[in-house]
Image (cartoon, rainbow, N blue to C red):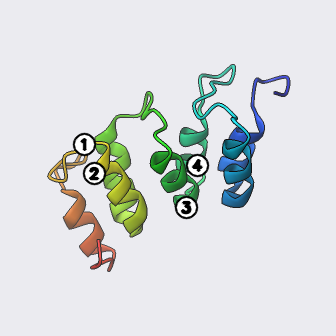
Amino acid sequence: SDYDGRTPLHLGASEGHVPIMKLLIEHKAAIDPVDRFGGTPLRDAHRGSKEAASAFLLQHNCSLGEMDASTKFCSHAAAGDVTAVRALIKHRCDPHTRDKNGRTAMHLAASNGHLPV
């Protein structure tokens, strides 16, 4: 890790480099390392809007961490990220959850033109 406790997985997630992340996980890298700011690779992927990286981490059973599942679910639905939405449902996220404005994930996806979600 670097001086901030960020691991290669943190960096791969924040940049959306899924092939690198896959290689790291195959070589037994920890899926949920926490840096000195309390950040995880999933949080970094989410903050950087790296949907494929988020989905990869969720598919590999990372912890949902400090960000509540409903926020993640609605964000991925609004972005049209079907893979991450499916992964979150597998992690038992309620598909009827609402964002802070009362909109469901389905409403957010549809309003952004992401009908496949």
Q: Of callouts 4 and 1, which one flags the residue occurring earlier in the amino acid sequence?
A: 4
Query: Mark 1 falls on what kind of element?
Result: loop
Q: Distance between the Cα atoms at labels 4 and 2? A: 18 Å
Disc 3 to disc 2: CB gap under 8 Å: no
Q: CA distance from mark 2 to mark 1?
A: 5 Å
Badge 2: residue crowd in 10 Å (few <14, some 14–19, many ≥20): few
Q: Which residue is mark 4?
A: 45
Residue that badge 2 annotates: 89
Residue 111, disc: none
Residue holding disc 1? 92
Gap in Å between the C-alphas at discs 4 and 1? 20 Å
Residue 8 versus residue 33 in the image, above or below: below
Which residue does the image show at 43% across and 27% down from the upper left?
66
Q: Position of residue 59 (x, y in %)?
A: 46, 50
Where does residue 67 sit, x and y in percent of width and height? 41, 34
Residue 57 appears left or right of 85? right
Q: CA distance from mark 4 to mark 3?
A: 8 Å
